[in-house]
Image (tube, grey):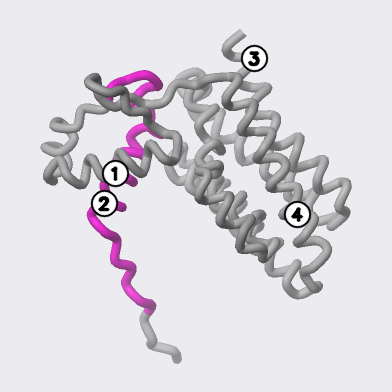
Amino acid sequence: MDHRLGKIKIISLREQVITAIRDAIIEGKFKPGEKIPEQELAQQLGVSRTPIREAIRILEQQGLVVTVPKSGTYVTESNIEKIKEAIVVRVVIEQLALREAIEHLDDREWGEFMNALEDILHRMQVASEDGDGVALTELDIDWHSQIVDAAHNQYLSWLWRSSGLQYLIWSPERSLYPLAKDKWWEVIYGRHKKLLDSLKSRNIEKCCAAIQEHIEQKYQDLDGYLH
């Protein structure tokens, strides 16, 4: 019997603060356009304002908050035109990643890729049944990061993460959360299940069409809500 234990993951204070603020936004504790109360957060989390400010700088780079000089930091509001522009870039990146993965992965590697997505999908189902929006959001980010990383193109993976595009995965839905409640989680799970069925074909054109439809659905949902 193997009694070896896995390494304990050490998470920095800054990462813990980033996660706490991001999760609060996901859960709707901070609404789009609402000011982030730095001093109050520092007191609630039991930290100084320094890690709060460091976390805010990272969250701003990721497009989740915006700092207004002499006013403060606010949760980014949904801007339909900016979201549409970013979604166009997301489609191109994920389609390119799928093309490279389909062309370059051998059968074993492709099978491992599909298994990884199957595992995430299963955990999405559990999160959906539990109504756990935070877990589902993390899994959604992980799902699409798996697609980008499957290309084994370090520049593509760098662009994906440095641009903060993975956080666009959930930002359009923030305006929809209060209306959809638990049913929204079921929708997210269902869409990923449909996408996985298409990806299993390993047909370039079918996969590229499926990922485009999957991503652009977010824009259509938000556009319908705002209009």
In reply to whether residue 34 is colored magenta, the answer given is yes
How far from the left and from the top, in percent, is residue 29? 32, 27
Where residue 24 sits, quadrant-wise, is: top left
Give the amino acid at mark 4. Answer: Leu
Judging depth in this view, the residue of 98 and 174 nearest the camera is 98
Give the amino acid at mark 2. Answer: Arg
Give the amino acid at mark 3. Answer: Gly
Label 2 sits on residue: 14
Label 4 sits on residue: 98
Element type at mark 3: helix
Give, as a single range, the part of the protein colored magenta.
6-35
Residue at the (37%, 31%) spot, across then down: 65
Element type at mark 4: helix
Judging depth in this view, the residue of 128 and 202 nearest the camera is 202
Q: Is residue 6 above or below residue 170?
A: below
Element type at mark 1: helix
Task: Examine the rendering and report whether any part of residue 194 can be seen.
Answer: no
* Image quadrant in which the N terminus is located: bottom left
Of marks 1 and 4, which one's residue comes earlier in the chain? 1
Residue at the (65%, 55%) spot, across then down: 148
